[in-house]
Amino acid sequence: MTLYAPPDTRWCEVFSEIPEHLQLHDTPSEWIDANKPGQSVPSFLEGPVFDAQGNLYVTDIPHGRILRVSPDGQWTCVAHYQGWPNGMRFGPDGRLWIADYRHGILAMDPEGHEPVPVLTHVGSERFKGVNDLFFDRRGRLYFTDQGQTGLQDPSGRVYRYDLETQRLDRLIDNGISPNGLVCDLSEKALFVAMTRGNGVWRIPLKDHGPAGKVGMFVQLAGGVSGADGLALDEAGNLFVCDAGNGCVWVFNQHGEPLWRLRSPTEGRTLTNLAFGGPDRRTLYMTESATGTIIRCELETPGKSLSY
């Protein structure tokens, strides 16, 4: 029995590709040795986020770089350091906040300079390996601590950090590879992509302490990877990157599938996404394996990230 009609397919277009002079062919990288041994990985893009001027910032995980792409597609390297940067967001302080697998939560001046540490441990214990982050309207930081967790080790964590009080709450500690995350429109619940569980969990929020009544919001199927970056539009629709199938799934507030946004490239590693453009009606996505940024025009604007 089919519960829902199959989602409509929409094809995206290529916005820009990392230029040859910024591709690092055969450059030594411990990340490549651990994750893609024996392969040449000139870049692996992640963490898209826009500034107020319409510039798109992305991370290059294996080579420890923060790259900026202008509205007309011109690329600049604004930071290059010894780290593995992944998700990014602009914080209430105007700095670019970075989830770095090796170092924890970092922040940097968006014009450049080396990122500086903000959160490197919890209770003197280092993080497993942070992955992505998100700020709510109150300026509180949520981030995932993924490490090497998965079905064999469901111990991934999700944290909330209050910048004013410096209170750090562990919301869950049994995640199956927690990755992208975003609040719902009312900010009464947090959606978290569980990559190796290939689904999205819904975590009810309260002001203090761990979460309760966590549930499965949507379950994906197939692929060698799973649910990755998340985004929300002003109608409350949830956009879920499928890192193994080269697409983004779009679900309404009830978890019913609406659309499947397909990549025009041959790569299948579509990892993260961000709304951009003057009216936030253009969705930009990182196709990591090919070093490509793709985009799709949509009717409903993305949820505002201002505070």
Image (spheres, rainbow, N blue to C red):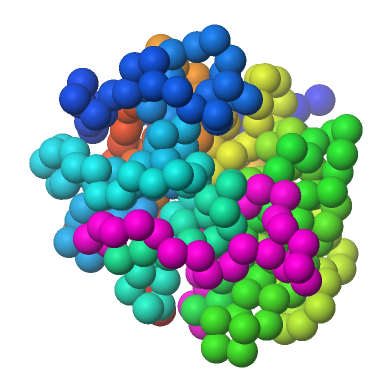
From the viewer's perspective, tell me whether residue 181 is left or right of residue 157.
Answer: left
Residue 29 at x, y percent in the picture: 48, 27
Look at the image and tell me whether residue 2 can be seen. yes
Q: Which span is picked out in magenta?
A: 110-138
Residue 12 at x, y percent in the picture: 34, 29
Q: Quadrant of residue 105?
A: bottom right
From the viewer's perspective, tell me whether residue 43 is left or right of residue 85.
Answer: left
Residue 78 at x, y percent in the picture: 25, 50
Residue plotted at (55% across, 81% down): 163
Q: Quadrant of residue 256?
A: top right
Residue 278 at x, y percent in the picture: 20, 58
Where 221 falls versus 209 (above or below)? above
Residue plotted at (38% across, 27% down): 43
Where 291 falls versus 75 (above or below)? above
From the viewer's perspective, tell me whether residue 213 is left or right of residue 43.
Answer: right
Whether residue 134 appears in magenta in the rendering, the answer is: yes
Residue plotted at (30% across, 49% down): 79
In which quadrant will I find the N terminus? top right
Residue plotted at (87% across, 39% down): 153
- Of all residues, the one furthest to the bottom in this rendering is 165
Could you say which is closer to the camera, residue 33 or residue 194?
Answer: 33
